[in-house]
Amino acid sequence: MSITVEHLQKTYGEQQALNNVSFSIKKGEIVGFLGPNGAGKSTMMKILTTYINATSGNASVSGFDVRDHANDVKKIVGYLPEHNPLYLDMYVREYLEFNANVYGISKQRISEVIQLTGLSPESHKKIEQLSKGYRQRVGLANALLHDPEVLILDEPTTGLDPIQLIEIRQLISKVGKEKTIFLSTHIMQEVEAMCDRVIIIKKGEIVADKNLDDLRTQNEQTIIVEFDFRVEDAFLKKLPHVKAVKNTYGFVYEISFSTQEDMRSSVFDFAHNNELKILQMNLKNTSLESLFLQLTS
Ligand code: ADP
Ligand code: MG
């Protein structure tokens, strides 16, 4: 196991931030830690990265206990904190070199990481000149310097604009091919975009722990389709397994089905047989959305 957490509790004075939390993460998994603000996500991550101690319970990373073997854990883990502390008047490469020196990391590795995180064109700029998206890349580059097995990323996409968001997601997915990643977010779509598995936390307690594939294969799906022409709702209701049809705007329809089968090809055949053209079509995973709303509202 890459990460093991057993009956973890954390209290800050009177405030209970984590209550009897247990889970484990296998090597190579990308796991989303999803929950609203104040749920206990950052607290969990600070414990796993050895920055704070739990009140009780155990946690280990690659078999090393976070309390008793903090130095071993730090060697294995790359951490991007929520409020990523950067030295704004340092240059990108200078900042990475500064951190690399602390760990005795080679100049070649710094160049590799700059390349990997797409920072090459920005590496001669001062950090204060960078956009939020590029600052996050610097944080990620920093977390990757010592080539850790496990990456712990605390809300890595919060505050990014839509384009930066897509770029950082792609970068995380790329890096995740070789590493175990535990990332927190309060946005459900982030989990869908990047993760194999979701652990949902609410008020310090784990309320769900599911593989995304299992959620995807639950009997709920919505297809959003745009035709080139108007279609009667009643006509669309002839599709197999249809639960509901809604004309959202123009010639766009939201069709929900109760089946495990991917209904996109049926919608395609339906359009073809009725001489309609499909201008766009998307499959929405309604089960994750409804699960999250149910569990956190
Ligand atoms: P999240 O990252 O999910 O937003 P946090 O782990 O930051 O949640 O916080 C969990 C709870 O613990 C919140 O109620 C928060 O106010 C409280 N908390 C976090 N850090 C401290 C602290 N240093 N002192 C007191 N309370 C804290
Ligand atoms: Mg937080």
Image (cartoon, rainbow, N blue to C red):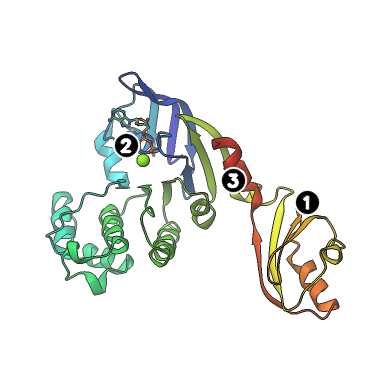
Image location (x, y in percent) of residue 51: 26, 35
| 281 and 212: which is toward the camera | 281
Which residue is denoted by mark 2 in the rendering? 46
Where does residue 172 sit, x and y in percent of width and height? 41, 58
Residue under numbered circle 1: 258
Whole-angstrom CA distance, mark 2 to mark 1, is 41 Å
In the rendered view, tell whether residue 231 sits above or below residue 175.
below
Left-right relation of 247 to 127: right
> 106 and 268: which one is in front?
268
- Residue at image x 54%, y 46%? 197
Which label's residue is closer to the chain start, 2 or 1?
2
Image coordinates for residue 183, horizontal then vertical, percent = 42, 47
Q: Mark 1 Cα within 10 Å, few/some/many (few <14, many 20+)? A: some
Q: Secondary structure at mark 2?
A: helix
The residue that disc 3 covers is 211
Spatial separation of the CA atoms under disc 1 and disc 3: 20 Å
Amino acid carrying mark 2 in the image: Lys
Q: Quadrant location of ligand 1?
A: top left
Q: Secondary structure at mark 3?
A: strand
In the image, 270: left or right of 125? right
On screen, residue 214 versus residue 64, left or right, reads: right
Q: Give the class, few, some or many, for how many residues have Cα within 10 Å of label 3's Cα (few <14, many ≥20).
A: few
Disc 1 marks a residue whose amino acid type is: Ser
Q: CA distance from mark 2 to mark 3?
A: 24 Å
Measured from the top left, where is residue 46 in percent x and y?
32, 36
Task: Report the residue at 55% width, 36% height from top.
Answer: 297
Classify mark 1: helix, strand or loop: loop
Which quadrant of the view contains residue 224? bottom right
